[in-house]
Image: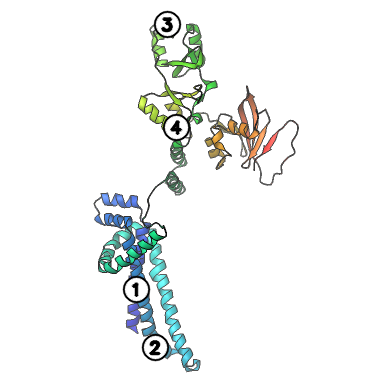
Amino acid sequence: MMYGFLIILVLAAISAFFSLSGISLAASRRMKLRSIAEGGDARAARILSFQDQPGLFFTTVQIGLNAVAILAGIVGDSLLSPMIHGLLPDILGHALKGQVASAVPFVGVTLFFVLFADLIPKRIAMAVPEAVALRSIEGMRRVIFVLAPLSKIFNSLSSVICRAFGLPDKRRDDITSDDLYAMVEAGTMAGLLRKQEKDLIGNVFELDVRTVPSAMTVRENIVYLDLHEEEARVKEKIASAPHSTYIVCDKDIDHIVGYVDSKGLLERVVKGQSLQLDNGLDIRPPLIIPDTLTLAEAMDQFKGREENLAVVLNEYALVVGIITLQDIMMMLMGNLVGEEEQIIKRDETSWLIEGATPIEDAMHVFEIEDFPESQNYETIGGFLTFMLRRIPHRTDSVVYGGYKFEIMDIDNYKIDQILVTRLAPQEPKQEESPEVQEQIIP
């Protein structure tokens, strides 16, 4: 009897070893293993090689688990059934005693293996997969060597079946931006990253999604100097709108000649020279980019030309804005610096927002996953114009995503200020008045 229990304990330990090895290999993080392997640990390199080609490893694990389970059942029935049969009262009858004597060892051994040879080892392997894998890999290598002929047969058969049904038989470790963002989110929840750091990383991911118009200075806000402008007028513009660079145009903004640095203008003032733009002033040719580029592509353009300012043109070769490296950096660092924001929180349920605010910023602040047909506009003002399907007027509003977007101010047909109000879930739709045109978007 004691030998029976001892054999079952040994078989349970072997089964636990296979469970630990299989789960730890699957759960081990490749990046951490690579770091360990680069530190000189050959075991980590072996684990990585098995992760690249896991078929033989898992085939051996399954053969071991099933063989041990079958052997444990045989041992339990042959060694424990007679003992249990002798302990049962004769009143049950010979047939019933035989059935009970066979059932009790089967149930008992099964429950014991489920708990101690399966659940507990797997929980340990999931908690510290790399440590378990490093400790078990050498033992598994020896088992794989012993069972190699049988394992290769089953592995080949499983590969043929997977290919026949078009199923993947190799591990893929492609990492997408969504995967990285999920890791950042998990790091923030665990306290490893601060919210500002999470926002910064999230903004980096958006460089490949956000287009140039979302960060540029729009045409209406560009301060430019005319090539033939009088010196007094040039000084007046510089004094009223100080910038680091100024676009120089010939008569109108769609005929750009180049741009000048305020540093060069200051040097001429210090030296007592004229600020007349067509009088020997160093005007640099501008970098021209289309408005369809993403911010990541715009940064590549800046790097290629070693410029920090670009003029943005639309498909009709008209100037729609200008963008600088500083604009892109401000988009990345906007939540970390003390600059005035385009979205001002008035109270717990309302915000005042500029019409030129990029739609991505509104999505982030109001936690709205997506705006309808957002490929048709870049700003929150564009969203309202698109949804209203007409030139907007003051007090027009749109309800979407649990918020009411109401136009507060319009400047020359351009939406300037918007009041955003969070609606209470139970708030019924109010009747429209003649002064307010409201559109409800489901």
Q: Find the distance from the CA under tag 3 to the CA under tag 4.
A: 38 Å
Q: Which mark is residue 295?
A: 4
Identity of the residue drawn at 30% across and 65% down: 152
- Residue beneath disc 2: 82
Q: Find the distance from the CA under tag 4 to the CA under tag 2.
A: 78 Å
Mark 3, secondary structure of its residue: loop
Q: Which mark is residue 67?
A: 1
Residue type for callout 3: Ser
Q: Is residue 159 left or right of residue 313?
A: left
Q: Find the distance from the CA under tag 2 to the CA under tag 3.
A: 113 Å
Identity of the residue drawn at 39% across and 70% down: 116
The answer to whether residue 306 is above or below residue 365 is above
Residue type for callout 2: Pro
Q: Find the distance from the CA under tag 2 to the CA under tag 1.
A: 23 Å
- Residue beneath disc 3: 274
- Closer to the chain start, of discs 2 and 3, is 2
- Closer to the chain start, of discs 4 and 2, is 2
Q: How would you rate the neighbour count of disc 4 (Cα within 10 Å): few for under 14, some for 14-19, many for 20 or more?
A: many
Query: Mark 1 and mark 3 in contact (Cβ < 8 Å)?
Result: no
Query: Mark 4 and mark 3 in contact (Cβ < 8 Å)?
Result: no
Q: Nearer the viewer, mark 3 or mark 4?
A: 4
Q: How would you rate the neighbour count of disc 3 (Cα within 10 Å): few for under 14, some for 14-19, many for 20 or more?
A: some
Mark 1, secondary structure of its residue: helix
- Closer to the chain start, of discs 3 and 1, is 1
Residue type for callout 4: Leu
